[in-house]
Image (tube, rainbow, N blue to C red):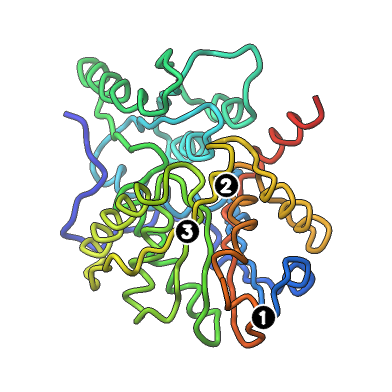
């Protein structure tokens, strides 16, 4: 049978992929450019140090450790060809000496997205759904797992984006890491797609006594849908870690989708330009740029408070940024 990634009963282990803690950098010129009077800090999860995985290294070091302890030998996950998580999962499986099969929505294209190309270079096998709807990946992953079982393999099936309580546990720990780097309360803004990152941060913030206000910029799904997913995941993560269960009011989401998932927004492009020119920071158009563009809207009146601290959680996405630049140049 296929192994599922969310077993409880023991404290989750890390596989040791990420170089932690990641730095927390001051960004006064970017804050000024965004019209903020308070302090702006950048949590540099683009510098986790594993492959080009960015923040995904935190999820994957939990998932890979769980996979190895379960006796599974094939990692099965999926998404779109541009998925940061898929290429990172392929790299993590290669690091652990495990096989990886990725299920991509749609059909092969003559031009590979850099993330897809990277995943193939990491050694991943690829299957296509021949259906552009991202949700088509879910059923095909189960089909692939069944085929692997018939071949005598033990697959470890991870949902799109690594959004499981076990994967989110990496960000429960990350909340404590950030809290140790700060000297007081703060508002934290992070791009949110499948919800695993925000879920772990929310669960971790609740465990710390809610000194940190975790806010997501929803780039993939309607905020109401994303909030439900995040709350469910955060509670599962809290149960796994043995901490207080988050409440509905602990989940805050802004609608940062713009024209839609995977499509740059005007707000995000402006924020990306400001980040480059004021801080030398590269943010990708799919997640981080849209989240950065939403910061002042999320802050509301706190934007004008000179005593308020805001942390922008930079999740990485370098290859997505390269793809975005290539698209702009054509």
- Location of residue 21 with respect to 158 vertically, above or below: below
Q: Are marks 2 and 1 in contact (CB under 8 Å)?
A: no
Q: Are marks 2 and 3 in contact (CB under 8 Å)?
A: no
Residue designated by label 3:
216
- Location of residue 12 with respect to 91 vertically, above or below: below
Residue drawn 55% across the image and 87% down it: 183
Q: Provide the secondary structure element on which disc 2 rests.
A: loop
Q: Provide the secondary structure element on which disc 3 rests.
A: strand
Q: Quadrant of residue 280?
A: bottom right
- Location of residue 24 with respect to 78 vertically, above or below: below
Distance (Cα) linking label 2 and label 1: 24 Å
Residue designated by label 1:
38
Distance (Cα) linking label 2 and label 3: 11 Å
Q: Is residue 290 left or right of residue 191?
A: right
User: Are there few (<14), some (14-19), or many (20+) residues within 10 Å of tag 2?
Assistant: many
Give residue 70's position: percent from left, percent from top: 23, 43
Question: Is 287 in front, or is 204?
Answer: 287
Q: Quadrant of residue 120?
A: top right
Question: Is 161 in front, or is 19?
Answer: 161
Residue designated by label 2:
287
- Quadrant including the C terminus: top right
Give residue 189's position: percent from left, percent from top: 53, 64
């Amino acid at each position: 049978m296929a192994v599922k990634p969310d077993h409880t009963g023991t404290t989750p282990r890390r596989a040791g992929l990420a170089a932690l803690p990641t730095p927390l950098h001051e960004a006064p010129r970017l804050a000024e450019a965004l019209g903020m009077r308070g302090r702006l800090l950048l949590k540099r999860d683009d510098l986790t140090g594993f492959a080009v995985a960015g923040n995904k290294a935190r999820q994957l070091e939990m998932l890979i450790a769980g996979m190895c302890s379960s006796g599974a030998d094939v990692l099965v996950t999926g998404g779109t060809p541009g998925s940061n998580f898929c290429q990172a999962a392929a790299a993590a499986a290669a690091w652990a000496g495990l096989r990886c099969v990725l299920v991509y929505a749609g059909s092969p294209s003559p031009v590979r997205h850099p993330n897809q190309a990277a995943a193939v270079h990491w050694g991943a096998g690829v299957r296509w759904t021949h259906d552009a709807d991202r949700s088509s990946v879910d059923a095909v992953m189960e089909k692939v797992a069944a085929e692997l079982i018939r071949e005598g393999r033990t697959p470890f099936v991870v949902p799109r984006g690594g959004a499981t309580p076990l994967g989110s546990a990496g960000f429960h720990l990350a909340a404590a890491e950030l809290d140790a780097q700060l000297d007081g309360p703060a508002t934290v803004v992070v791009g949110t797609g499948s919800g695993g990152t925000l879920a772990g941060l929310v669960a971790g913030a609740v465990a710390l006594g809610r000194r940190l206000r975790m806010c997501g910029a929803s780039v993939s799904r309607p905020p109401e849908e994303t909030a439900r997913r995040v709350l469910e995941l955060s509670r599962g993560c809290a149960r796994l870690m043995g901490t207080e269960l988050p409440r509905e009011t602990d989940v805050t989401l802004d609608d940062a989708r713009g024209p839609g998932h995977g499509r740059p927004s005007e707000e995000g492009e402006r924020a990306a330009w400001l980040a480059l020119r004021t801080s030398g920071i590269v943010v990708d158009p799919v997640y981080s740029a849209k989240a950065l563009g939403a910061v002042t809207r999320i802050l509301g009146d706190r934007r004008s408070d000179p005593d308020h601290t805001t942390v922008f959680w930079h999740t990485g996405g370098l290859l997505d940024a390269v793809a975005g630049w290539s698209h702009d140049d054509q």
